[in-house]
Image (cartoon, grey):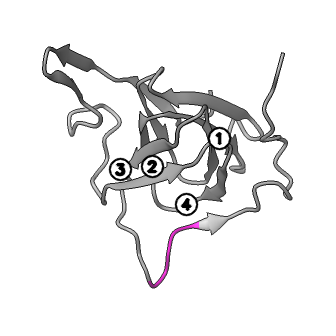
Amino acid sequence: MIEGVKIKQLKVIPDERGFLMEMLRCDDEFFQKFGQVYLTVAYPGVVKGWHYHKRQTDHFVAVSGMLKVVLYDMRDGSPTKGEINEFFMGDKNAILLVIPPYVVHGMKGIGTQPGYLINIPTEPYNYKKPDEYRIDPHDNDIPYNWEKKDG
């Protein structure tokens, strides 16, 4: 696992009315602070990424559909520099994924339905000077191929 990345297995509480799923709590051991909450959607087969942040920690929860979220540690001095982690999250795996600054990340919609992802970053989006650094999803030095792996 990449240094600083954390996974929280989410608690889903079902009853005859439906279900409730807690995502992020201020008493979680990894909670830092609240910046904002937003929803992003990836259509099946679409790759959204790569990018990273210099200040912001992300907290990803896929709330509908399935997503493949991939992380790459590019941090100089990190004991896990060069490591890649894949996470399959959503309907079949209810987790919260904590992504620290300078860890490159991207996602791909998998399955037949769009994947809905909630992010609760530690910083609000700065429209004048975004903490967002993009890398082409296919033309880069990251040792990862987004193609489906059959077999």
CA distance for labels 4 and 2 = 9 Å
Q: What residue type is labelled 2?
A: Asp
The C terminus, quarter of image: top right
Q: Residue furthest front?
A: 112
Instruction: For marks 3 and 4, give the one nearer the viewer.
Output: 3
Question: In percent of the image, x 82 and y 54: which residue is there?
Answer: 138
Please state the extent of the stretch shown in magenta in the rendering. 128-132
N-term-proximal mark, 4 vs 2:
4
Query: Residue drawn 14% across and 14% down?
Result: 16
Image height of 130 relative to 58, above or below: below
Q: Label 3 amino acid?
A: Ile
Say which element carries label 2.
strand
Q: Does dot 1 land on a helix, a strand or a loop?
A: strand
Asked if the residue under mark 3 is in contact with the one under mark 2, i.e. CB atoms within 8 Å, the reply is yes
Q: Where is residue 24 in the image (x, y as percent from the top left)?
A: 28, 37
Q: Which mark, residue 71?
A: 1
Residue 9, relative to residue 54: is it above or below?
A: above
Q: What element carries label 3?
A: loop
Under tag 4, what secondary structure?
Answer: loop
Label 1, residues with CA under 10 Å away: few <14, some 14-19, many ≥20: many
The residue where tag 2 is placed is: 58
Q: Report the residue marked by disc 4.
A: 53
The percent coordinates of residue 97 (x first, y second) are 46, 35
- Identify whether 119 is placed above or below 128: above
- Residue 150 falls inside the magenta stretch: no
The disc placed on residue 120 is 3
Alpha carbon of mark 1 to alpha carbon of mark 3: how far? Answer: 17 Å
Q: Quadrant of residue 146?
A: top right
Residues at circles 3 and 4 in contact by the CB criterion of under 8 Å: no
Inter-mark Cα distance, 1 to 4: 12 Å
